Image (tube, helix red, strand yellow):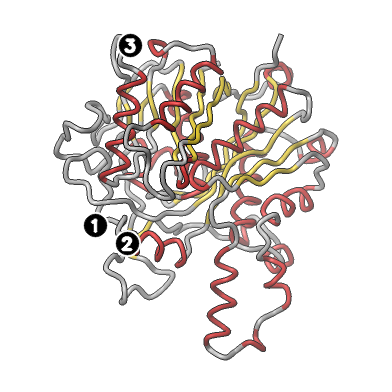
Amino acid sequence: MEKKVVITGIGVISPVGTGKKKFWNSLVNGVSGVAEIKSFDTSEFRVKIAGEIKDFDAEKYLSESQISKSGRAAQYTYAGTKMAIEDAGIELQKLKDKNVAVCMGTTMGEVQVVEEIDKKICSQKEEDIKPELYNQYMSNNITSFVMQELDLKGPQYLFTNACAAGNYAIGYASDLIKRGKADMAIAGGVDPFSRVAFTGFHRLLSLTPDICSPFDKNRKGLVVGEGAGILILEELESAKARGATIYAEVKGYGLGMDAHHMTSPHPEGEGAIASIWSALKSASLSVDEIDYISAHGTGTPANDKIESIAIRKVFEGAKKIPPVSSIKSMMGHAMGAASALEAAACCLMIQHQTIIPTINFETPDPDCIEDCVPNVARKQALNHVLSNAFAFGGNTSCLVLSKC
């Protein structure tokens, strides 16, 4: 019999709050974390808003020495990991005795290190660049920093599948446990806010100047966000034996690749459809068994339309299309962290049997999904949920989480 993999710990750093409790309370009450950008001067930009993290204090989670040798992505990951381990009720010493994998997804890595180096070079202050700064840049530091500082001895993997990377990491981590390659896994995604990412989306004319309103007829674009979502995965019987809180089972996942365009989704949603069907097959579930879909839901005209096409095609033979919502309406698009944060949100929705709303919704769009749980959270029985994450280059993914 194949092992069942469950999620027993959650660590969150997000624009709507650091920590599981703040994260959930903000999302279920429709609180937005989008605000005017504080990290750099936006006078040359048309758009001035983003989903920046406001309440993260690195000194609460890392020593001065740890801070000096780690970039922001590694700091977010380490802090989120400590939260998740504590939430899972695991003693660090016992963790060291296990084969623990670390699987993380990212889009930009430690890009803010490059920005800092570039800033000093442009200001002709190269002598102020500390050698340690160059060491922080390598993206594999994100996983190796956690492994080294917690003295873990399992495998480590870093996934760079853009905005689908978190789902890739969680899915692969579940496979490692099922195949006996790891006893437990720390899995998720991370991306700090950066001028590079913001400028790129700004040049693509993908950003909204005011609010993110997924699936609304008058939606104008996405908001760039940041954050880290970290989950503790372990085998079901192990979790039961130690009396752990079980948020959800990682029932299955699916990956797709349509390679239609570097930035635009396939017009018929081929990659999205492939990943959703693959996830359902992996989980041995029918379309009628799905109670809710956590949408990729970026708020761009094309993305929401194509995701709606894909969902309608997959569920055209179902009794009904399940409700769909997007947490990006509240915290923006956290790139490689997005799907991991959405997986964390799905775990909490299953725990509370409540669907998080899509805020800023006013006008239905016939091209989009009909029920996006507009503006107000909804109590509903949730046994099986899908979480979509689609990315540049045609990378698509879908995670299935189930009540256990």
Q: Are marks 3 and 2 in contact (CB under 8 Å)?
A: no
Residue 154 x/y as whole percent: 80, 39
Q: Is residue 262 left or right of residue 107?
A: left
Q: CA distance from mark 3 to mark 1?
A: 36 Å
Residue 366 x/y as whole percent: 16, 31
The three-letter amino acid code for the residue at tag 3 is Ala
Q: CA distance from mark 3 to mark 2?
A: 39 Å
Quarter of the image with the N terminus is: top right
Residue 73 x/y as whole percent: 59, 57
Q: Is residue 151 left or right of residue 140?
A: right
Q: Which residue is mark 2?
A: 49
Q: Quadrant of residue 43?
A: bottom left
Q: Nearer the viewer, mark 3 or mark 1?
A: 3
Helix, strand or loop at label 2? It is strand
- Residue 18 appearing in the image: no
Instruction: Rate crowding at label 3 as few (under 14), some (14 to 19) or many (20 or more) other CA atoms within 10 Å.
Output: some
The three-letter amino acid code for the residue at tag 2 is Ile
Q: Which residue is mark 3?
A: 318
Instruction: Rate crowding at label 1 as few (under 14), some (14 to 19) or many (20 or more) other CA atoms within 10 Å.
Output: some
Instruction: Rate crowding at label 2 as few (under 14), some (14 to 19) or many (20 or more) other CA atoms within 10 Å.
Output: many
Quarter of the image with the C terminus is: top right
Q: Nearer the viewer, mark 3 or mark 2?
A: 3
Q: Of residues 364 and 85, which is closer to you in this image?
A: 364
Q: Which residue is mark 1?
A: 210
- The relative height of residue 399 versus residue 300 in the rendered view (above or below) is above
Q: Of residues 36 and 386, which is closer to you in this image?
A: 386
Rendered residue at 70%/16% (across/down): 3
Q: Which tag, 3 or 1, sits closer to the chain's start? A: 1
Q: Which tag, 1 or 2, sits closer to the chain's start? A: 2
- The relative height of residue 306 versus residue 282 in the rendered view (above or below) is below
